[in-house]
Amino acid sequence: MFVRVQETAYLGSFGALAGWDQATYIPRKGHAHRAMMQATLARLLHQRSTDPRIGEMLARVEGSDLVHDPTSVEAVNVREWRRSYDLQTKIPERLAVELAQATSLGQATWEEARPKNDWASFKPILQKIFDLTREAADAIGYQQERYDALLDQYEPGATTRQLEPIFRRVREATVDLLQRIEGTSRKPDPAILRRYYPRAAQEALGKEVIARIGFDLEAGRLDVTAHPFMQGIGPGDVRLTTRYDEHFFNPAFFGTIHEMGHGVYGQGLPSEHYGTPMGTEVSLGIHESQSRTWENLVGRSLGFWRYFFPRAQEHFEALREVRLEDFHFAVNAVKPSLIRIEADEVTYNLHIMIRFELELAILRGDLSLEDAPEAWNAKYREYLGIESAEIKDGLMQDVHWSAGLIGYFPTYSLGNLYGAQFFQQAEKELGNLEEQFARGEFAPLLEWQRRNIHQQGSRYWPRDLVRQVTGEDLNPEHLIRYLNAKFGALYGV
C-alpha cells in the first residue's frame, strides 16, 4: 500500500508543478489546454484514491496491533488514509473532474477579468464553481452545516460552531482596539513606504532575508505571480512567489517573508515520510501560523529591524536618512484598507471574517452570487468603515473562490490565533526572542518550530497539536493580548 500511495503522491506533484507554472510562466493562450491536463490528472488521481483495494487493505490493518498507539507513524498514516479514502469515495469521479476543469478555467478567467473590473465575465464560472462545491459538500455529508464539510478538508476537526464564538471575541476586541487607535493623535508616516524601491533591490533584499532566516534557496526558488503563494512540489523543491511594486515597499517584502514561512514548513517536513500523512502538513491553519509568525511576529518586530534595517538602507537610497523607529512605526501602521493581503495586523482578521460570513450565507442559500458584491461592500462599511469603488478591489480581489477554495478563508485567522499561542510558548522555552532577532539569531525559533510543528507531520490534528505544544486549548486571548501590547505601545493607547 505504501508504494501505491507514494506513486499517487508523485502524480500529485505533477499537478502541483502544473499549477505553479499556470500561475507564473504559462503562455496566455495555454490555459484551456492546461485545464484539460488538470482535469485528466484529477480523473487519474480520483481513480487511484478510490480504488476498492485501498479500502480492503485499510480494513486489514485497522484494529491490529500495528495501530494500537494512536500517535505512532503507522497509526497516523492509517487514520489519515482512511479519512482521505472515505472522503474521496463520496465524491463521484464526474464531479471531481468537473471541479478540476472549472477551477482551472476559473483561475484563468479571474486573472484576465480582475484588472478590467469585469464581474460579468467572471460571474458565470464562479457560479458554476459554487454550484459544484455545494454538490461536493452534500456528497461528503455533514451534521450541522454544509460549510463544515468544506472547512474540515482544510482544518481537520474544525466546525462552524467552534469558530463562530472565537471569531466573535476577536472581532469585538479588534474593533475596540481599532477605535482607540483611530482616536489617538500619534500617527506614523506611511509616505516612507511609498518612495522609489527598485525591483532588483527588493528581490536582492528579499532573498538575503529569507536565506538568513533559514529558507534553503538550493531547495526552493522565488518567482513572480499575480497573487503570491507557496507551492511545495516535493522534497528539495519548495517554490515561493511574490509580486513587486516599485513605489510601495510592503507587498513584496512582507509577502516574500509570509510565503517563506510556508516554505520553511514545507522544507521542515520529514522527507523520509514523503507521500504519507506523516510527511504532510496537518492543516492550512497550522500552515498559516508559520507564515504569519514570520511575517508579523518576527518580520514586523523592532528587534528584526534592528538587525536588517542597516542592510535595507544599503539596498534603498530612499531609506538612507530615515530613522529606524520611524520606519518600524510605518511598517506597523494601522489603517482600514480594502486589500486583504496588504492589511495591517489589527484589521486583517476583519477581512477574513467578512469572507467567512459571506461564504456561509452563500452555502446556506441566504445570499445569491448576484447580490454578493453589494453584501461585500455592506460588510466592509460595517466592519472597516470603507468600501471599494471597483470590484477588483472588492469581491474579485482574492484568487481563492476561482480556485474552488471555499471554506479556506477561516484558516487565515486560525493561523494568527495558533501563531500567537505558539510564539508565546516558544518564548517561554527560548527566552526573549526579539533580543535574539536583533542579533540576527533566527535559528532558535526555526528549530523550535521544526521540532514541535514541522516534524510532527499530521501526527496530531490542529487543536490537538496546540494542546500538545502549549498545554492548553486554542485561546484567542493570546492574540488579543499581543495586539493590545504591541499597538498600545506604538500608538500610546
Image (cartoon, grey):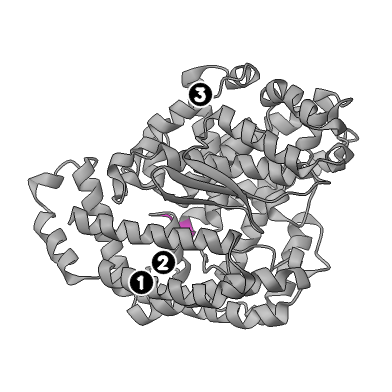
Q: Pick the residue in front: 310 or 370.
A: 310
Write down the region rendered in magenta.
157-161
Q: Residue 218: within the magenta?
A: no
Q: Residue at x 14, y 44 (%)?
A: 68
Q: Which of the two labelled residues, at mark 1 and mark 3, occupies the earlier sequence position?
A: 1
CB of mark 1 within 8 Å of CB of mark 3?
no
What's the residue type where badge 3 is placed?
A: Ala
Q: Residue at x 18, y 64 (%)?
A: 54
Asked if residue 263 lies left or right of residue 326, the reply is left
Between circles 1 and 3, the one closer to the viewer is: 3
Work out whether 343 lies above or below 332. Answer: below
Q: Which of the two labelled residues, at mark 2 and mark 3, occupies the earlier sequence position?
A: 2
Q: Pick the residue in front: 130 or 236.
A: 236
Gap in angstroms between the C-alphas marked 1 and 3: 42 Å
Secondary element at image label 2: helix
Q: Which residue is mark 1?
A: 140
